[in-house]
Image (cartoon, rainbow, N blue to C red):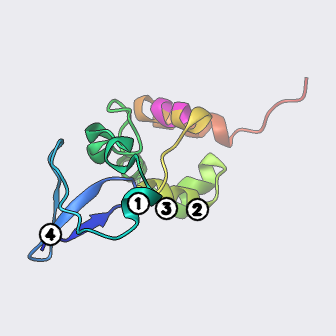
């Protein structure tokens, strides 16, 4: 019997001997026959492409992991969240792979990867009134 687990980032892994093994793209899943499943979900087999099984939530390979950025800056999750102006839960979700940074947050993290001191100094300074 094949044991599978759906990860928070959408990947499906096989459980063997207490360890997780990613499913190879194109591997057919051995799903036991369930009465009514085919009629309830007619496009189940073709609904999800094989790439979707292995792709993570963050498609940007050039963007370093949030945890690595935070550790390089030698900050705790709380300190990092405070400097970025986001809730600490957001940092936790990014680091655990439950969510991926998008839009402005993703751009800010890319800049932090190149010049963290400059970014943190700019974020710490008070804006001057015009």
Q: Secondary structure at mark 4?
A: loop
In the image, the segment drawn in magenta is 107-111
Neighbour class for label 1 at 10 Å: few (<14), some, many (≥20)? few
The residue nearer to you, when weighing 64 against 4, is: 4
Q: Position of residue 48 (x, y in %)?
A: 35, 43
Q: Secondary structure at mark 3?
A: helix
Q: Secondary structure at mark 1?
A: loop
Q: CA distance from mark 1 to mark 4?
A: 20 Å
Q: Which mark is residue 88?
A: 2
Q: Position of residue 43 (x, y in %)?
A: 40, 46
Sequence-first tag of 1 and 3: 1
Q: CA distance from mark 1 to mark 3?
A: 13 Å
Q: Are marks 4 and 3 in contact (CB under 8 Å)?
A: no
Q: Are marks 3 and 2 in contact (CB under 8 Å)?
A: yes
Q: CA distance from mark 4 to mark 3?
A: 31 Å
Q: Position of residue 41 (x, y in %)?
A: 43, 55
Q: Which residue is mark 1?
A: 8
Q: Which residue is mark 4?
A: 2
Furthest toward the top, the residue is: 130
Q: Residue at x 58, y 62 (%)?
A: 88
Q: CA distance from mark 3 to mark 2?
A: 6 Å
Sequence-first tag of 4 and 3: 4
The residue nearer to you, when weighing 45 against 33, is: 33
Q: Are marks 1 and 4 in contact (CB under 8 Å)?
A: no
Neighbour class for label 2 at 10 Å: few (<14), some, many (≥20)? some
Q: Are marks 2 and 1 in contact (CB under 8 Å)?
A: no
Q: Secondary structure at mark 2?
A: helix
Sequence-first tag of 1 and 4: 4
């Amino acid at each position: 019997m094949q044991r599978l687990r759906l990860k928070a980032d959408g990947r499906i892994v096989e459980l063997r001997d207490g360890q997780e093994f990613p499913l190879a793209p194109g591997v057919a899943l051995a799903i036991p026959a369930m009465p009514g499943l085919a009629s309830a979900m007619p496009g189940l087999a073709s609904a999800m492409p094989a790439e979707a099984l292995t792709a993570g939530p963050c498609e940007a390979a050039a963007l370093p992991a949030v945890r690595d950025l935070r550790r390089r800056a030698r900050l705790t999750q709380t300190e990092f969240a405070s400097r970025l102006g986001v809730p600490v839960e957001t940092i936790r979700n990014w680091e655990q792979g439950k969510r991926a940074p998008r839009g402005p947050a993703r751009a800010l993290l890319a800049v932090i990867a190149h010049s963290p001191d400059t970014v943190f100094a700019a974020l710490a300074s008070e804006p001057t009134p015009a």
